[in-house]
Every structure is written in structure tokens, then in C-alpha cells.
Amino acid sequence: MKFKNIPQTDLYPSAICLGTASFGTSIDTSTAFQMLDTFVEYGGNFIDTAHIYGAWVPDGVGLSEKIIGQWVKGRRVEENIVIATKGAHPLLSAMDVPRLSRQDVVADLDESLHYLQTASIDLYWLHRDDPTRPVAEILETLNSQVKQGKIRYFGCSNWRVERIEEAMRYAAEHGLAIVAYTSQAHGYFSKASNNLHLFPIKCVKCIPMERIPGGCAGFREYPRHLRYQETYK
């Protein structure tokens, strides 16, 4: 297994990231534990989840995070695993209503910490954006959580390029580190897109679990001056 540094962090996750969107729903706890055990057996240490995962079933919010938390504690692998999770996703019943207020962000983060049974999250992404809310306000909310020790590094997920640019500029001006993320579905790194050159730093790309058999997701680093010319199948 290869390991790569995520730029502007001291994180060295495996080049294969295990996606867990279906943990607790179509994948039961026992099977999820088997998948996690096998992933680690083959050298993986990077696990991706989200506060919203499981919300499509009754009382399902945080199901994926809960299973991961149980597994990490049961296997005593806290020091060996890099966990990335996401928060501030709109309610599935009101997808047009953003949830990027400080109250929403902190509430989701605190619940994720509880579900994952950890005091700090390695990499915390905001799952969606609210274009009407100033980037400065959002990033300062996240930075306050870093200062409190709740998260080590933060970033944005599924944001438009112009908003990522704005966030990157603010972060650079204020000495903050931010990790940009997008899923394959949006095509930012496909042949159909020429947006890659707009990213000010190297970015991380994760493919959702359902995209490839076996439930794993890969990531690569993309220098600003390169435009990736291959589409994941």
C-alpha cells in the first residue's frame, strides 16, 4: 500500500480510501467490520464517512460514523487510522435549505465526535456550501474548532470552483490550511472539465464508495499547473 501526504497537513493516509456511505444501511455492522478489518490487513488506513450517512433510513443519521467509532474502539487502532468525515449537510427533507451557520456546523461536529468516539477528527469537510454566507465566517467557525482541538484539519466538499478559490485566498491570507474535495460525480477532474488549473494548491479527490466494486475510494494529488486527462470508470 502506498501512502501520500495531504498537502499542508502532517497526515499520511493510504492512497486507497475506504468509503463507508452504506455502513449501517445496506451494509450491516458485521459486514462493515469485516470490510474494515480487510482494508487494514491490506495496509489501508484512510476512512471516509459523513454525519449525513444513514439519514435515508429512520433514525439513521450518523449510522456510518457510529459503526466506525465502534470498530476503532474495539480494535484499538485510534493511533493508526486517518478518519475524514463531513458535516453541515442540508436535511434530506429540505435540500434547498443550507446549514452552514456556526450553530449548525458545531452541532454536527459535536455529534460526529460522539458517534466516532473520539476527541478530535483528523480531517473535517463541510459537506455542502451556502453561497450566500461569507467564506470568512465559515472558515473562522472551522478554525475556532481547530483551536479547541476538535478537528486537526478542515476543508470544503462539493463547493463550486469560484467559492473554493475564495476560500483558498482567505486561508492563505490568514495562515489557515484548507483541503479541497470533490466527488467524481461533479466532473471537476474529468475530460469534460478544464477547472483544475484554478485550484491554488494540490487537491484531494475521493471517489464515493458506490463508484467502484468493493467499496474503496482512491485519491491522487493534482499540481495546479496540471489538468488531469483521465476519467475514472
Image (spheres, grey):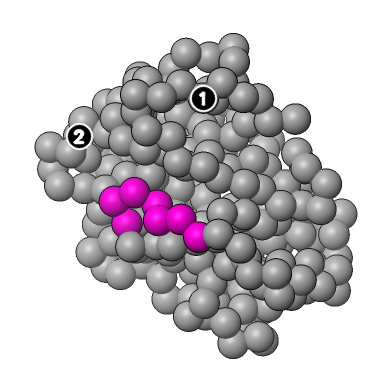
Image side of residue 184 versus residue 21, left or right: left
Q: Which residues are magenta?
A: 3-9
Q: Is residue 7 magenta?
A: yes
Q: Is residue 209 left or right of residue 180?
A: right
Residue in the picture at 25% in, 53% down: 143
Rendered image quadrant of residue 100:
top left
Q: Quadrant of residue 146?
A: bottom left
- Name the disc covering residue 228, or none: 1
Mark 1: give few (<14), some (14-19) or many (20+) Cα within 10 Å: some
In magenta segment, residue 167: no
Q: Mark 2 and mark 1: span between their CA atoms?
A: 26 Å
Q: Residues within 10 Å of mark 2 (few under 14, many from 20)?
A: some
The image quarter in which residue 162 lies: top left
Residue projecting furthest to the front:
2
Q: Which is more toward the observer, 85 or 226?
A: 226
Q: Position of residue 178 (x, y in %)?
A: 32, 45
Which mark is nearer the camera, 2 or 1? 1
Residue 213 place in picture, x, y as percent: 83, 46
Q: Is residue 107 visible?
A: no
Q: Which residue is labeled 2 in the image?
A: 170
Can you give x and y, in whole percent of width and height, for residue 185 in the image? 65, 27
- Earlier in the chain: of badge 2 and badge 1, it is 2
Quadrant where the C terminus lies? top right
Q: Residue at x 67, y 86 (%)?
A: 74
Q: Residue at x 31, y 40 (%)?
A: 138
Q: Viewed as shown, does residue 144 lie left or right of 21?
A: left
Residue 13 appears left or right of 29: left
Q: Which amino acid type corresponds to the residue marked 2 in the rendered image?
A: Tyr
Q: Please, is residue 118 above or below residue 75 in the view?
A: above
Residue 211 visible, this angle: yes
Q: Is residue 130 above or below residue 145?
A: above
